[in-house]
Image (spheres, helix red, strand yellow):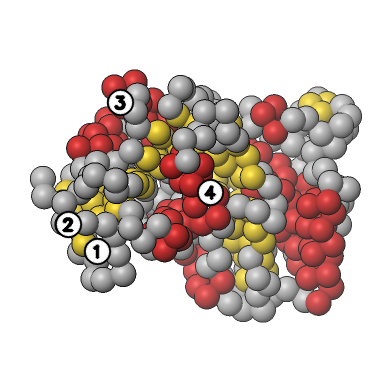
Amino acid sequence: MSRPKVRHLIAVAIAFALAATLIACGGDEESGAEGQTTIGFLYVGPRDDFGYNQAAFAGSQAVAEAFPDAEVLQAENVPETAEAERVMENMIDDGATIIFPTSFGHLEPALNVARKYPDVTFLHQGGLDTAENVGTYFGTIWQAQYAAGVAAGMATESNRLGFVGGFPIAQVLLNVNAYELGARSVNPDVTTSIVFTSNWCDPAKQAAATNSLIDQGADVITQHQDCTNTVIETAARRGAKVTGYHFDASRVAPEAWLTGAAWSWGPLYVDAVRTIEAGGFEGSKYDGRYRSGLGEAVQLTPFGGAATPEIRERVEAAAAEIRSGELEPFTGPIRDQGGRVRIPGPQPSVEELEETDYLVEGVTGEIPG
């Protein structure tokens, strides 16, 4: 399969093959030239999805800018299968010594390839398992979801919020729980209904889930999907307000937009590459499960037209308290849907929270078996 090479900051050619696109940005005409750093990025979807993959792609562009002599390889639409292994091995053939597999389901393929190539460093986005040359990083984005929940709890008139989830993995459960807790902190009567689409980016399922939630009375909608514009557009068309996720997609529906939880990966990616290039990966914060907090890789998006001055003030106050450590959203007692106390006292560690397997009191909907 041919993989076109281009120099940094000139025209980018995109070749689609087996659902993956490989782009080389920066560096010499021959990949893997001696002394040249080659860095690979994998995305499960398109880089312009107004969501997860667009946020990661923006981070990769920060790497290309910070390392103008490096070659940056890009692969879009890489499924969470053995195909991801093939894409990573092709990147290694092209000289990659640092690879960022960015999707949750890219972890197992990365671990498999890492065993074959011990001299290549892999940095997986959100993984719970590591290896000698595999570290993981993510962010406590549930903190921003809590703050966005504050906005939703103040904005709702029906006291019903809607959440379009992908799969019932711990991160999704953690986010909907944080959203409901944030909303209830300002509105004790509010509930959040969740619908799982069993997909990260299926516009038809997203639209159906959004319409179903609105039909049930939800007047503020959020999500944990990779591509986000369908949910936003559908909700706005139905007259609902929205809070965003992964990326600042406020321009999709500026008047319906409240705020959102978003990623700012650039500084983290750049620092990770510098750390590895300096030979300091082993024993660094990236050699394990590194988690960045609110105000770092996790950000609140700007407010939109639906956010009143009162909402803005309350959300900013909650975010400031989280950043300072004054507010810990998962401080108990916190009960699950059945009334069982899951967190009796102080907030658990991030590692424990990332094992969440329940929905909190106030969330309606079932976790698929």
**Left/right of residue 101 with respect to residue 368 in the rendered view:** left
**Left/right of residue 318 with respect to residue 269 in the rendered view:** right
The residue to which callout 1 is attached is 7
**Left/right of residue 80 with respect to residue 250 in the rendered view:** left
Q: CA distance from mark 4 to mark 2?
A: 26 Å
Instruction: Note whether residue 170 is visible.
Output: no
Q: Residues within 10 Å of mark 1 (few under 14, many from 20)?
A: some
The residue to which callout 2 is attached is 29
Of the residues under marks 4 and 3, which one precedes in the sequence? 3
- Which element carries disc 2, helix, strand or loop? loop
Q: From the viewer's perspective, is residue 283 above or below residue 250?
A: above
Q: Residues within 10 Å of mark 2 (few under 14, many from 20)?
A: few
Viewer-closest of 179 and 191: 179
Query: Residue 4's image quarter?
Result: bottom left
- Which element carries disc 1, helix, strand or loop? loop
Q: CA distance from mark 3 to mark 1?
A: 27 Å
Q: Amino acid at mark 4?
A: Asp
The residue to which callout 3 is attached is 117
Label 4–label 3 contact, CB within 8 A: no
Of the residues under marks 2 and 3, which one precedes in the sequence? 2
Q: CA distance from mark 4 to mark 1?
A: 22 Å
Q: Residues within 10 Å of mark 3 (few under 14, many from 20)?
A: some
Q: CA distance from mark 2 to mark 3?
A: 24 Å
The residue to which callout 4 is attached is 271
Q: Please report the residue visible at 65 percent of the width from the left and 75 percent of the height from the top.
A: 304
Of the residues under marks 3 and 1, which one precedes in the sequence? 1
Of the residues under marks 4 and 1, which one precedes in the sequence? 1
Q: From the viewer's perspective, is residue 98 above or below residue 241?
A: above
Q: Amino acid at mark 3?
A: Tyr
- Which element carries disc 3, helix, strand or loop? loop
Label 1–label 2 contact, CB within 8 A: yes
